[in-house]
Amino acid sequence: MPLLVKTLFSPWRRISSYGGRSFDAKVRASVDNFVSRLVGFVSRLLVLIAATLLLALTVIAGVIATIAWPLLPIGIVYCVYRGLVG
């Protein structure tokens, strides 16, 4: 995730255009570079959002597992008791 944050505004797939001598070629290269950076920004931002959500879900699952783990033997004893008593 830190690498994605550092390269958030980098061009997508290192695609860069270099303008020629004419003004039209320079404008076209600037637009191409802007679109490439915009695509890179959006894709990296979506990956960062997904990574943050998955990290939060992992933390929540870890907290639940940490709380449930010591209670597991009590649950087993309770289930055996309920199975025997009916």
Image: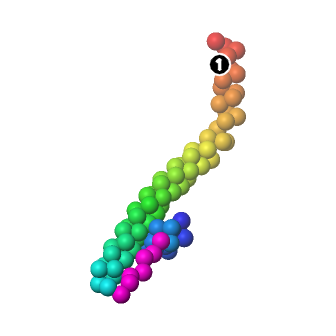
User: In the image, is residue 4 part of the stretch drawn in magenta?
Assistant: no
The boundaries of the magenta stretch are 15-21
Residue 57 higher or lower than 22, as above or below: above
Check disc 1 and report its element: helix, strand or loop.
helix
Quarter of the image where one finds residue 73: top right
Q: Residue furthest bottom?
A: 21
Give the main secondary structure of the magenta stretch. loop
Residue at (64% x, 12% y) in the render: 86
Residue position for label 1:
82
Quarter of the image where one finds residue 49: bottom left
Q: Position of residue 17 (x, y in %)?
A: 43, 76
* Left or right, residue 5 beside residue 29: right
Q: Position of residue 24 (x, y in %)?
A: 29, 80
Q: Position of residue 51 (x, y in %)?
A: 51, 57
For this rendering, which residue is in front, 85 or 64? Answer: 64
Label 1 is placed on what type of residue?
Arg
Q: Position of residue 84 (x, y in %)?
A: 70, 15
Q: Residue furthest top?
A: 86
For this rendering, which residue is in front, 47 or 81? Answer: 47
